[in-house]
Image: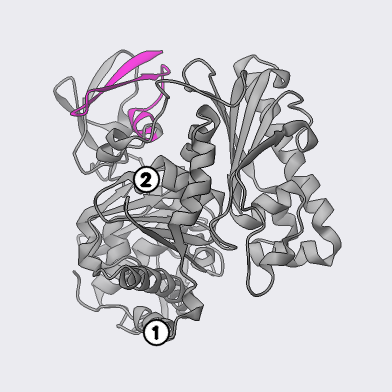
Amino acid sequence: MYKLLILPAGITREVPPGQSLMSALRDNHIFLDTPCGGNGTCKKCKVLVDGAEVLACQTTVERDLAVTVPEDTGLNVLQAGIPAEQEELRPVRPGYLLAFDIGTTSVVCFLLDPANGTELARSSMRNPQTAFGADVVSRIQSALCGELEQQTDAIRRGMTARIQAVCRNAGILPEEIGVVSVVGNPAMQQLFLGISPKNLAGVPFAPVLTEAKHIPCADYLPVCPHAELLVIPDISGYIGADTMGCILSTRLYQREELTLMVDIGTNGEMVLGNRDRMVACSTAAGPALEGANIQFGMRGTDGAIDHVWLENGAVTYSVIGGGEAKGICGSGIIDAVATGLNMGLLNKRGRIRNESHTFPLTEKIFLTQEDIRQVQLAKGAVYAGISLMAKQLGADIRDIQRVLLAGAFGNYLTPKSACRIGLLPHELCNKIVTVGNAAGSGAKMLACDQALLPLTQKLTTRTRFLELASLAEFPKTFAKAMNFQEEPQ
């Protein structure tokens, strides 16, 4: 392992030999501007290594390095305390520590060292419950139609495989695990625990997981017979332990400045507030922004167009993994719509101004008029949620001092593009930092420190849930937010 000194923060991290500097920085929640996807063509990821300017995506860690990064890369969030390690560990019981982030689309497992909380191994997979439906609503309906047991079995089998993988990589036995923390949205939590999601299928959509507690893990994941399973309470029927993980890891509940946390996945959860007050809401934003309901949409895997920009008047793009483009993922979709607006190809109502009513990106891949409509629905919901949360706190959007973009989508999203299309208010463009998998970081923190579990109970009562659909002003705000601004900000 080599030592990486990150300046100007003065933070030292250990990095395995051969890892790219770009990847090492991302692992530590520092995200450089990379519109080319790390192919070395855009020249935007410049940093100083031992005083010499290099491209982070083209630099391999082969010795101890001192790297100086720009101040707008999320370093302030790193300093604020999304820890790669804990100074003092106080788990609920001794043994190795496991943390799970169960997303609707993906599941990530982290194995942590009980001595200092550092990550020993991680393993991820596509959520096996996708066989029962791509979205939360489909899976709830599937469970209510008699497939609850099958969904519970599928996720537990998948998690067991991930546990075995990380233990094998670290050279330990699952029997040595002492704590397992799990975060996810309310539906994902209940399906894992084998609890019917009937409460999430109709009014008042009340949460059933309202108590923070730890229980024997063997009853749910027998592969860990000696571990305690942490159950994190939900804020509402829509806002779950994954959002609580984000609140913990970003220290939003301790901040003095008015801060907006946005986690856009298959669903979009947002929290606005500070140490005095917090309000949260959920929006149906994710499907289009993750490539679903888009004709050539796909997940952010090899072959996906992940960034689009204008270069010398021509539409240019980058492809994950290089090679021929197979489709376009969420970050590319946002960039493409922003580029179309800057070209004048789209009007304020989202109409494509050409005879074919398509926006060609390659000879085979293009955005359709319906694709643009799907993006408008998604971005309108997010923007409306932000506006109405600010109003509930008696604040103006301009009063928001910091925006934290969480989740995989937030990692690769181009903030300027997000503000250009109105996914995020343009007034916030210079206040955005990315914080990586904040939900997963929160799960790690919970596994390391038993004091945080009862804190989650208190935070559920401190966080007010805002049901957007119940607000009389939501339809008008949403409809207005669907429009674009024709002139660049």
Find the distance from the CA under tag 1 to the CA under tag 2.
Answer: 40 Å
Percent of width and height locating residue 433: 29, 48
Percent of width and height locating residue 21: 33, 28
- Work out whether residue 220 or residue 437 is closer to the camera in this orientation and state it: 220
User: Where are the magenta residues, as a range?
Assistant: 1-26
Q: Is residue 101 left or right of residue 64?
A: right
Q: Secondary structure at mark 1?
A: loop
User: Based on the displayed image, in which of its 4 quarters is residue 68 positioned?
Assistant: top left
Magenta residue check for 247 = no
Mark 1 or 2: the one toward you: 1
Magenta residue check for 16 = yes
Whether residue 297 is visible: yes
Q: Which residue is mark 2?
A: 37
**Residue at the image point whose x is 29% and y is 46% from the top:** 255
Q: Amino acid at mark 1?
A: Glu
Q: Quadrant of the C terminus?
A: bottom left
**Residue at the image point whose x is 42% and y is 47% from the top:** 247
Q: Amino acid at mark 2?
A: Gly
User: Based on the displayed image, in which of its 4 quarters is residue 4 positioned?
Assistant: top left
Q: Indicate which disc, 1 or 2, sits on the residue closer to the N terminus.
A: 2
**Residue at the image point whose x is 33% and y is 44% from the top:** 254
**Residue at the image point whose x is 20% and y is 27% from the top:** 7
Q: Quadrant of the N terminus?
A: top left
Percent of width and height locating residue 140: 72, 64
Pointer 1 local density, CA inside 10 Å: few below 14, some 14–19, many at least 20? few
In the displayed structure, 159 sits above or below 348; it is: above
In the displayed structure, 76 sits above or below 463; it is: above
In the displayed structure, 390 sits above or below 353; it is: above
Q: Which residue is mark 1?
A: 473
